[in-house]
Amino acid sequence: MSLRFGLIIAAVVLVSPPVVAQIQPDGTVGSQVRVEGDRWVIEGGAQRGSALFHSFEQFNVGRTPVYFRGLEAEQIFGRVTGGARSRINGTLGVEGLADLFLINPNGILFGPEAQLDINGSFVAATANGMVFDNYEFSANEPNEVPLLTIRGPVGLRYAQPTAPIQVVGSGHNLRTVDDLPFTPFIDPGATEAGFSVAPGESIALLGGQINVTGGVIAARSGNIVLGAIESGNLTLDDFRPVYAQNVERGNIQMDESALLNVSGLGGGSIHLLGNRVGIRNGSYVLNQNSGTSAAGFLEVDAAILTIEGLAPGRDELDVVRSGAGLRGFTSIGAGSHIQIEADRLNLINGGGIGTSTYGVGSGGDINLAVGSLSILGTLNILNGTPSYIQSLSLGSGDGGDILIVASDTVRLVDGGFLGSNVSFIADRPTSGDITITAGSLQVIGRNPNSRRRSIVFTGSNLETVSGDVSVRANSIEVRDGAFLGSYSFGLGTPGDVNLSADNILVSGFSEIPSPTFANDRQPNVRILTRELESPARLDFSEFRSESHLDRTLVASLFISDFNEVEDLNVSNTSGNIQIDSRSLIVRDQAFITAVNGTSGEAGGIEIDTDTLILDEGGISADLIQLGRNAEANFGGNIEQGYFILKRAFKVLSVAPANR
């Protein structure tokens, strides 16, 4: 236990008053508290139909367990009307099957010894009142409960300033096999501690701010909701808050190995709703599905969502505690889908979002609707886990798709990782597709410590199949050693790469490739753009034994600085490169090649352009075909078996390139 957690625990114990004074009814609804064996029992109250109401001047739980008795109730509502927050650092329970609602507008603290012994669901809120169809159960203006049937509840009413809800603990003990990243956790249910409800039930914490510092909250195959509300009214839909337009949101922070866990035999959803949401320093939002039923959703709705691993200077050998993220795993049933809506989404220092299947079940999809997305590299030197968005298949089930819609920029820097890959041979699973629609896509550089490159890719292994990569943006930039494409190893099949942008820049030892490394079909790379500039390498390379390769580049193409557009083939059948462009410029020792690596025979290059300029650049192929009324200025090399010129154009050759 760290010094920080030790001080927090000591403070909770030292400031807690004797148990007798911890629960004090306010006399408004007839609540009574008495000792029964080793526990305190809350009886009486106002019964209205299936609803039971209690009201307290103060409400705290310490070493002696406290139970609500409501065997005939379906819902129990408790309000705290005094001026102090509630401290729960022991067992809070319900005798019977009722759901329990606790509201205290002055705040609620759940300490490291807090436990729930509840067969139903649990809602804790710092609202000023709970609103029903025909009544408000107010904590600010305590009143009697009317002698009529209460229907609801409909929602909660908040008025500024709204107090926070805090959950404090010593952190989870999650671990993976051999401490490997991106693999399932070993028995995630073993880390539940006591702050949990019965399987299939819900926990909702709805406060002005929500701070989970080392706390572990669990609802096996159930639901967990964290909602931060500064002011306004919200409705409850099956324990999930539905915000009205006038709601001002607060912040949510998960820190110091905090955990929200709905892992179980299918089902299970987690919802985070706030202004600024932070998941940091070994904290996770988790659903690991070990059943046959489909898992639920992991959802975040925020203005700014930041997922951050350990900060610099806090290196941790444990790969789990050094990261942070939203994770969905599955074995048999379908996995959790992850859905995020945010103005800004930041993944930093090994923070990430991932879905994985390690059995026959299909992995969950990842759907992001954001203003901007930043995936910022790897700063943890000891284990080098990158910041990531990943869909992974380690079994025979297909991987989930990744869909990103960003009104502004998607940016991967210093080793940021965005990938969908598959590595198991049985039943030939397929990795998910990656589809990005954005104002701009920037894939930049390598991490200065780990040397990992920034990468956007789909990948396959053995006899598996890669998904496709599709990007539609105003501009695409891949530079300083970064990678954008699809690949395969073994007998795997790479996916297609489709890029559509007004401007595309590839520079600085970066690549837009689709390589394979054994026998299978060639992928297609389609680039639709007004301008493609490559003072780097467009390495359209392939190692295969048969089939056909098409490469299409539309609009203006600039290739320079000792680089190539290349189709490299080790078979007897070379591939082809198609270039459809208003202008094509090859300069500064650059080359366009279609080369057979075994026999030395070149493939075909078809060029349909208005203007072709070779300025100390070269073209090498078995067939070079020029179309349209093109004007060509050759100040470089043309190496070919035969050369076909169509229509009228000029050929000028000045200085050949040196390779």
Image: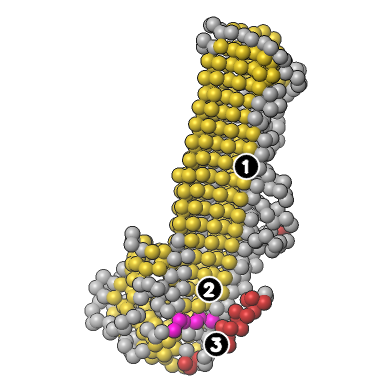
Identify residue type, mark 2. Answer: Val
Residue under pointer 1: 444
- Report helix, strand or loop for mark 2: strand
Residue interval drawn in magenta: 84-89
Identify residue type, mark 1. Answer: Ile
Residue 85 shown left or right of residue 145 in the figure: right
Residue under pointer 2: 167
Residue under pointer 3: 15
Residue 244 shown left or right of residue 134 in the figure: right
Foreground mark, 1 or 3, reads 1
Q: In what quadrant of the picture does the N terminus appear?
A: bottom right
Identify the residue at image location x=52%, y=91%: 17
* Dot placed on the residue nearer the N-terminal end, 2 or 3: 3
Residue 438 visible here: yes
Give the class, few, some or many, for how many residues have Cα within 10 Å of label 2's Cα (few <14, many ≥20): many
Identify residue type, mark 3. Answer: Val
Identify the residue at image location x=53%, y=27%: 531
Q: Position of residue 239 (x, y in %)?
A: 40, 66
- Looking at the image, the residue that sits furthest to the top is 648
Identify the residue at image location x=63%, y=80%: 7
* Dot placed on the residue nearer the N-terminal end, 1 or 3: 3
- In this rendered view, identify the residue nearer to me: 406 or 367: 406
Q: Position of residue 104 (x, y in %)?
A: 41, 78
